[in-house]
């Protein structure tokens, strides 16, 4: 049986798309690390199903990191239109939390008045870089978890282990 290089891209694309979309949806994005790790685990699962030979832990790292990069890019692109929605949700939370607090730190009112403003190119680039690195790191961890969960064991040759003793008088039954 020939071993070939596994095709990482399709598995990473599917897992990365799932992690990117799930991490961008409001309220679901509270579990951001969970979605990244789960998407990378799913990527390794898909890769493992598509290959006929056992994969190595480095394959899990690679498909998880690649899925993380793809997921980070998708998350970043989806976060652009969803940022005002997320900001309103946070402001509502802060307003209701302030009703239950007796002493608020100075400048608390200013946080509630923040409005979304378009960022400059450098901050967008830094955000994209950090998001992609974060997703790639946790994706690699998820790929390793997927490897430990779904790895295929190498096929072992079946040997005929019934042996006939050389001298039938040497074998003692009952002991």
Image (cartoon, rainbow, N blue to C red):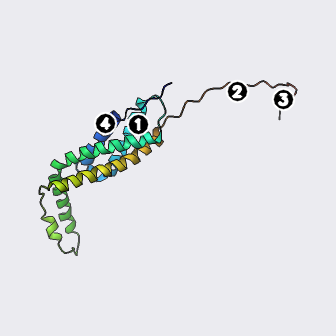
In three-dimensional space, the C-alpha distance between marks 3 and 4, rounded to whole angstroms, equals: 60 Å
| Local secondary structure at mark 1 | helix
* Residue 45 image label: 1
* Cβ atoms under marks 3 and 1 closer than 8 Å: no
Give the left or right position of residue 66, taking residue 119 as reference: right
- Residue tagged 3: 171
Where residue 86 sits, quadrant-wise, is bottom left
N-terminal-most mark, 2 or 3: 2
N-terminal-most mark, 3 or 4: 4
Residue 26: where, in percent of width, then height? 22, 50
* Residue 14 image label: 4
| Local secondary structure at mark 2 | loop
Residue 58: where, in percent of width, then height? 44, 42
Name the residue located 16 percent from the left edge and 52 percent from the top edge.
85
Give the left or right position of residue 85, taking residue 55 as reference: left
- Residue tagged 2: 161
* Residue 85 image label: none
Given this view, does label 3 or label 4 mark the residue nearer the observer? 4
Name the residue located 14 percent from the left edge and 69 percent from the top edge.
110
Where residue 101 sits, quadrant-wise, is bottom left
């Amino acid at each position: 049986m020939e071993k070939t290089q596994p095709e990482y891209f399709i598995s990473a694309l599917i897992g990365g798309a799932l992690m990117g979309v799930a991490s961008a949806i409001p309220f679901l994005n509270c579990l951001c690390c969970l979605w990244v790790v789960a998407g990378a685990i799913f990527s390794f699962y898909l890769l493992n199903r598509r290959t006929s030979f056992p994969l190595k832990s480095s394959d899990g790292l690679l498909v998880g990191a690649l899925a993380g990069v793809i997921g980070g890019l998708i998350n970043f692109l989806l976060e652009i239109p969803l940022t005002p929605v997320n900001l309103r949700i946070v402001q509502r939370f802060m307003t209701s939390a302030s009703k239950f607090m007796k002493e608020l730190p100075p400048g608390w009112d200013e946080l509630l008045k923040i409005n979304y403003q378009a960022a400059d190119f450098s901050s967008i680039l830094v955000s994209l870089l950090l998001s992609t690195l974060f997703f790639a790191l946790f994706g690699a961890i998820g790929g390793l978890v997927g490897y430990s969960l779904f790895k295929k064991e190498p096929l072992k040759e079946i040997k005929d282990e019934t042996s006939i003793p050389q001298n039938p008088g040497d074998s003692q039954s009952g002991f």
